[in-house]
Image (cartoon, rainbow, N blue to C red):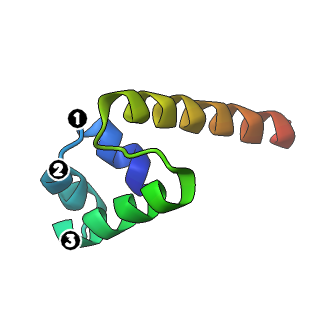
Amino acid sequence: ETLSVYLEQASSLEGAARMLFVHPNTVRYRLRRVTDVTGWSPSDVRSAFTLRIALILGRLAAAEQRS
């Protein structure tokens, strides 16, 4: 959820933190974990695009499994 909100907030740490009701450092930590796990940095424009597409495909796959 953190990655999705961060991308929806135009890559704003503070905006994402407000939406998630957490401290900006928590968002930083979670985004660092995304980078560690995927190898794609949400703060890089190209990587963020790739991550956004991955989120969309994941949601589509989950919706397809439910139906």
Whether residue 52 sits left or right of residue 62 in the image: it is left
Numbered marks: total: 3
Q: Quadrant of residue 32?
A: bottom left
Write down the residue under mark 3: 25
Residue 8 at x, y percent in the picture: 32, 37
Identify residue type, mark 2: Gly
Distance in Å between CA atoms under marks 3 and 1 = 17 Å
Distance in Å between CA atoms under marks 2 and 1 = 8 Å
Residue 42 at x, y percent in the picture: 36, 44
Q: Quadrant of residue 21?
A: bottom left
Write down the residue under mark 2: 15
Q: Quadrant of residue 20?
A: bottom left
Label 2 with label 1: CB-CB less than 8 Å: yes
Write down the residue under mark 1: 10
Q: Camera-side residue: 47 or 9?
A: 47
Identify residue type, mark 1: Ala
Q: Residues within 10 Å of mark 1 (few under 14, many from 20)?
A: few
State the residue at coordinates (41%, 50%): 3
Distance in Å between CA atoms under marks 3 and 2 = 12 Å
Secondary structure beneath dot 1 equals loop
- Point out the frontmost of discs 3 and 2: 3
Residue 41 at x, y percent in the picture: 38, 46
State the residue at coordinates (64%, 38%): 59
Q: Residues within 10 Å of mark 2 (few under 14, many from 20)?
A: some
Secondary structure beneath dot 2 equals helix
